[in-house]
Amino acid sequence: MSKKRYILLLKSFARVFNSGALLWLLFFILNTPAFAQNDEASRRDTIKYGTESEIANLIQTLRTENIDYLDDELMSLIGTSRNQRILTNVFGFFGDREKRGLEERAIKAISEREDETNETVLSAIDYLGRIRLPEAVPVLKELLNTEERRFLANGFRAIGRASSADSEMADTAVEFLIDYYTYRNPGNDNQSIIITAIGEAGSLLGVPFLIDIALNTDGRIPLRTAALTALAAIGDESGLEAILGCVSTNDPAVRTAAVAALGPFSGEAVDSAILDAFRDSYYRTRIAAAQASRDRRLEAAVPFLKFRAERDEVANVKDESIRALGAIANNEAVEILDNLFSERRNSIQVRVLACEMLMKIDASRFFSKITAELNEAKAGNQTNLYNGFLKVVGEAVVDGDTAEIERAALSFMQNGAMVERLYGLDMAANNNLKGLSEQIISLARDRNETLSRRARRTAETLGIEIPAQ
């Protein structure tokens, strides 16, 4: 009987069973092997013979599971297909991971765009930019020279990114972009995109151009903020004076962009500007100050970050301050984070984020304390807090003695619900817990395909052989 017919039959049972029983039956049937998620062989068949919708759904599953074992099959598929939905999904899937292999097909889609849909061409352009392919610069220049409005924004972004991997190509791209901005009519929106692309390219040839825009008090605010961000992306000291000059401007958006742009730079003037920005009444400027402190590991900012993490009225300022403390990670910062985590009157977000920072700084040192709070949250039915701590524990990587994390992972795999079992497997894979091989093999044989597949992947990572039944 088909899955659809089973569901229709269940609906008819609703007249007899209560809704709870109906939901239980539906869960049971959809998780039996007959209806479990496709195995690897059937996934390959989907790529070979499936519809565009089936392939799109498969790619979404691959994204969710973060796996790449079907990349070769997808490369073969895209080499022959002209189906717009398939092409855009595959280009997007590979581009998100900056995975090469589709360069030839992407360039072909652009060069022979009269035979492709707009969506396919745009996804090909984006892909070439995401993989930072310098060889794509000539074909992108040719495309932009046609001045086809539908492709301009994506083309500008892509040429900046693509050129960034080669200094000669970066110079070529920046000269082209400056000329386009100055002498053609790219449109208001595309002006900001061009400025950002110049920063992405990273060529020093763009610095004087960006300085002029950043310091132009009569210019549009979005252009000035884009120029400041681009100067920070290039990170050359010749742009620092202009950035500092914008830190005290009257416009809060420009001020915020200037403070955020200080991250890559150093020096007493830079430190002073960042610390002063913590006093700004505009909350985005305080966020920028925290982010710049994080980027520069600015120890002098720790007292300011403590104050903001504890008392700022804006949650996002608190969050960025905690992240900055985690990046600085000196003794004072660690003590502050420990206090933020331990204080049970703090918000869930503050405690979980502080917990995450502590685990990243020294998982071995804080693992016991964090798992104790995890158990306390569970005992107190604090579901949101428990789930937050659980995610941090599940992603932990411990250096040195792994006995404690092995016990926690085993407990998750033996006694936990589905999400806990999955985290237990992640802990085993991330910490090389080969001593859990018996439990991993058991889960690899579970009838829930999601759990079984994760266990098999964990076994492969750890070099554990799963005996045939």
Image (cartoon, rainbow, N blue to C red):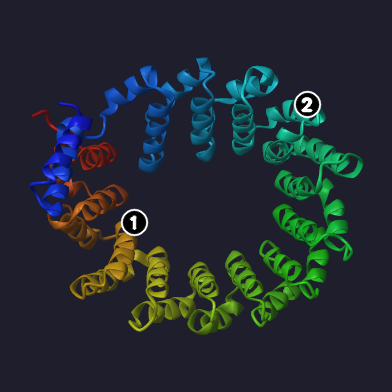
Quarter of the figure that contains the N terminus: top left
Q: Mark 2 belongs to which amino acid? A: Glu
| SS category of the residue bearing label 2 | helix
Q: Name the foreground residue: 155 vs 405.
A: 155
Q: CA distance from mark 2 to mark 1?
A: 46 Å
Quarter of the figure that contains the C terminus: top left
Residue at screen point 81% across, 35% down? 172
| Residue of label 2 | 142
Q: Which mark is residue 365?
A: none
Residue farthest toward the front in the current orientation of the protein = 15
Q: Where's residue 52, x and y in %? A: 44, 25
Number of marks present in the image shown: 2
Residue farthest toward the top in the current orientation of the protein = 80
Q: Where's residue 170, x and y in %? A: 76, 39
| Residue of label 1 | 395
Q: Quadrant of residue 374?
A: bottom left
Q: Is residue 9 above or below residue 326?
A: above
Q: Is residue 311 above or below residue 247?
A: below
Q: Name the foreground residue: 182 vs 203.
A: 182
Residue at screen point 59% across, 72% down? 290
Q: Where's residue 5, x and y in %? A: 19, 30
Q: Nearer the viewer, mark 2 or mark 1?
A: 2
